[in-house]
Image (spheres, grey):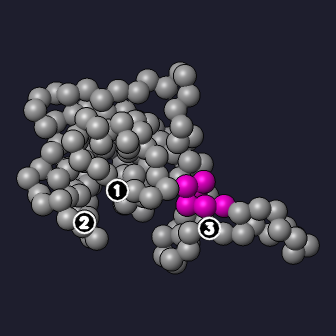
Amino acid sequence: ALELLKLFLTHAQGLAVVVDEFGGTEGIITMSDIVEEILGDALPTGDVDLYIEPLEPGKYLVSGDVRLDDLSEHLGFEIEAEGIDTIGGFVFNRLGYFPPSGTQLEIPRLAITVRRAGHKRIEELLLEKTTGAGEADEHPTNRVAA
């Protein structure tokens, strides 16, 4: 899955056709399928503890499986991510790699820190609203804490 994700990130392709050993078509796979495979199901199951916990004004502790549309309601602005359903999937997609705990990502209006990452998913994030303009940032900054 990671090899295919690298191909999706380096080439402007939205999907890939899966071919068997005889040249027959087995199906298609999308970037969303890859992210779900790596981070777990995008749609939360009943045993997943989802939370958006306000810590102080403009600062939130959130589960990595929180849906972007739910999070956008709490933040008061939209997080644009075509084909991505969760904040954990969004962070993974923007960075292009599975981030260890302490990794930071800055996008317009929001600073994101990975607080806890499991074997195959981002479990918890710290979000802090920033005073950036609302325009799209094509090159987000990111860094890993030492």
Choose between 103 and 53: the one closer to the eye. 53
Choose between 32 and 40: the one closer to the eye. 32
- Element carrying mark 2: loop
Choose between 45 and 146: the one closer to the eye. 45
Judging by the rendered image, the residue that carries numbered circle 2 is 136
Instruction: Give the distance between the C-alpha atoms of the residues marked 1 and 3, in whole angstroms.
Output: 20 Å
- Element carrying mark 1: loop
**Crowd around label 3: few <14 · some 14–19 · many ≥20 (10 Å):** few
Q: Which residues are magenta?
A: 29-34
Between circles 1 and 3, the one closer to the viewer is: 1
Q: Which of the image's four quarters has the N terminus?
A: bottom right
Give the residue displayed 30% in from the left and 29% down from the top: 52
- Element carrying mark 3: strand
Question: Tag 3: residue type?
Answer: Leu
Q: Are marks 1 and 2 in contact (CB under 8 Å)?
A: yes
Q: Is residue 58 visible?
A: yes
The quadrant where residue 3 appears: bottom right
Judging by the rendered image, the residue that carries numbered circle 3 is 15
